[in-house]
Image (cartoon, grey):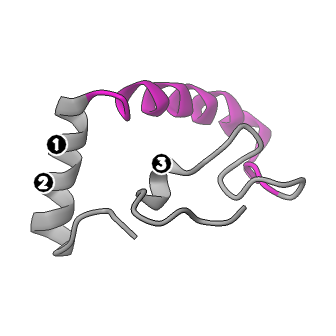
Amino acid sequence: MKLKKRIPVIDQGNKLGFWGNKFGGNFVPETLKKPIEDLEILFNNLKKDKKFIAERDKYFKNWIGTLPVL
């Protein structure tokens, strides 16, 4: 998967996993798969929420020193 410019890396995942292709996905113990899937569903809903994105950007700016843009 080629990274897109001007889009935060965290927003560039796909259905096969973060980096896509046949080797992407989660490599975690079976007992953690369901909680991780639940977290992924929640995050995919939240990343469309403008209030959540504004708060995320605030933490990026104040704690990391940059906005989450490539």
Identify the residue under disc 2.
58
**Does residue 8 appear left or right of residue 24 in this picture?**
left
Q: Which residues are magenta?
A: 24-49
Residue at the front extreme? 5
Which residue is depicted at the point 66% across and 27% down? 34
- Residue located at (60% from left, 36% from top): 36
| Residue 48 percent coordinates (x, y) | 36, 29
Q: Which mark is residue 54?
A: 1
Identify the residue under disc 3: 11
Of mark 3 and mark 2, the one earlier in the sequence is 3
Question: Is residue 62 rendered magenta in the image?
Answer: no
Quarter containing the C terminus? bottom left
Instruction: State how far apart marks 1 and 2 are (Cα).
Output: 6 Å
Residue 36 falls within the magenta-colored stretch: yes
- Give the main secondary structure, helix, strand or loop, of the magenta stretch: helix
Q: Residue 32, position in %: x, y? A: 66, 38
Give the secondary structure at mark 1.
helix
